[in-house]
Image (cartoon, helix red, strand yellow):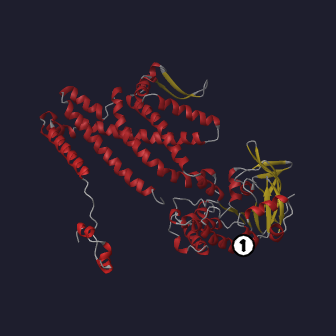
Amino acid sequence: MSVSDQITTPLPARATADRRDTNWKIVRRPSYGRWAVDALLAFVVVGLCWLSFTNPNFQWDVVGKYLFHPAVLNGLWTTVSLTTITMVLGVGIGILFAMMMLSHDRFLKSFAAAYIWLFRGTPLLVQLIFWFNISALYPQINIGIPGGPYLFSFSGNSITPFMAAVLGLALHEGAYMAEIVRGGVQAVGRGQSQAAIALGMTRLQAFGRITLPQALRIIVPATGNQVILMLKTTSLVSVIALPELLYSVQNIYARTFEIIPLLIVASVWYLFMCSLLSLVQYFLEKKLGKGH
Amino acid sequence: MSVPEAMVFAEGVTKSFGSIEVLKGVNMEVAKGQVVCLIGPSGSGKSTFLRCINNLETINSGWLSVDGELVGFRQEGNNLIELREKEVAARRAQIGMVFQHFNLFANKTAIKNVMEGPVAVRRMNKVDAKRLAETLLDKVGLKHKGDAYPSELSGGQQQRVAIARAMAMEPKLLLFDEPTSALDPELVGEVLEVMRELARGGMTMVVVTHEMAFARDVADIIFFMDGGVVVEAGPPSQILNAPQSPRLREFLSNVS
């Protein structure tokens, strides 16, 4: 039964039984425009691949040579550990400051707001260089009771690039995470915590058992985004001479001048790590999406 | 001052939000085993008073006790001293509450919703809590819906789960805050039927409602509130058939 058949035959003239018994086939209208765009894109993709794999200046053999170079792997390890440490600290700081923002105490609220204002409002690059040069401001850092004995005491000069990097990244990340956590908690309706409190839970219990697990559904995707962002943001610490992934390949191409292939080496590793993280995020979101 | 046999005893209870005084001296007494309905126009303070009974709102002045115990305070001489949060929570655990918008825990199945109170507050082990939850879900006619999430249930089913959740704490008093107001008309009946069953079982209930037919059938006493005070109280026959105050007469002519 073709399309033209159906149109030319006046419907009332056809037997009802015929209409009912025919297995009508839906014929979709053609989308020439979409096919044209698809073809164009395919052409571009093939062209780009062709250009990159046939251009000898990419030096794919050099990429292969350095992909698992010990210096590169060391840099990768620094990047991964820096990302892990700063994200753990950042999420902790974020939860703490989100709770302060949500508290009824005016002072706690203002303190948290000021922190977020300062650390979101200045460039991370500036913060990193600032922490690295903290000794210009405080040659000696003492932590203790003012006027009393010190608990900790260390020289500002002893701030290593790694410490400066962790401080800068974690404090900056904490400010963003605070807003993400606050948004997630506020998105859970007040009725949820009310119901928990009416059952006889304390406010902390209601937060931990009812509000937070539901807020996580909203917090996790944004946090996943932050982790992926952080993985690449760590490359900024190359300015304070910390040999993470980018700085490691920079070190190599400063000697060999194989700039492009070594940047490709770094990019391959960044892409690989990001893909892994996206996968983790996907499964986490699936697990937390229950009930929705 | 408190009457020992009263489940709820309120005298001169006031509550303000900022400069707005919502309760202006509420007097009320609910005996054990009684079912009372609070009726009145919106903004009259019914829901606020209900929320004061389990201390979701703290009163500003007056005397409010549940089962002989002050709500949120303890008495020392002439001082009423605010209780610590844990003590407030412990007293609240003995009072069940059913909300207008059900407020089922959205990330938990029906049975987990019912188990949550016993497990988290009464420290019951999960096996016993599950058995208890199954019995209660059966009682509200939802034995087969235990594994459903709230989003998969109708409004009437959600509210019946919410009633089961409140019952799981084995409360001595059940509060209902307009339990059928958010329901489609054809779902109201199934919720009221569960509430009727509870009333027949001797549960003490305070119900804020607009369902006059339910109030007439089930209530021992109806309190009519307006402007933050109880204007008139009495058995349904008197309140609904022979209203004394002009405000109640006007209210009844508007709702029927």
Left or right of B114? Residue A245 is left
Q: Residue at x 80, y 62 (%)?
A: B223
Q: Position of residue B251 (x, y in %)?
A: 77, 60
Eyeballing the image, is A95 above or below B125? Answer: above
Is B1 drawn above or below residue A173 in the view shown?
below
Q: Residues within 10 Å of mark 1 (few under 14, many from 20)?
A: some
Q: Compared with residue A135, is residue B108 higher up or lower down, i.e. above or below? A: below
Report the side of A90 relative to A199 (left or right).
left
Residue A248 drawn at (x, y percent): 27, 32
Look at label 1 and name its amino acid: Ala
Q: Report which residue position mark 1 lands on.
A: B199
User: In this rendering, does residue A252 appear at all?
Assistant: yes
Q: Quadrant of the C terminus of chain B?
A: bottom right
Q: Nearer the viewer, residue B246 or B14?
A: B246
State which quadrant residue B126 falls in. Answer: bottom right
Q: Is residue A122 left or right of residue B120?
A: left
Element under disc 1 = helix
Residue lying farthest to the bottom in this orientation: A17
Is residue A179 found left or right of A261 in the rendered image? right
At x 79%, y 58%, the residue is B225
Number of marks in picture: 1
- Which chain contains the residue that carries disc 1? B
- Given residues B199 and B6, the one toward you in this image is B199
Horizontal and vertical percent for residue B3?
85, 62
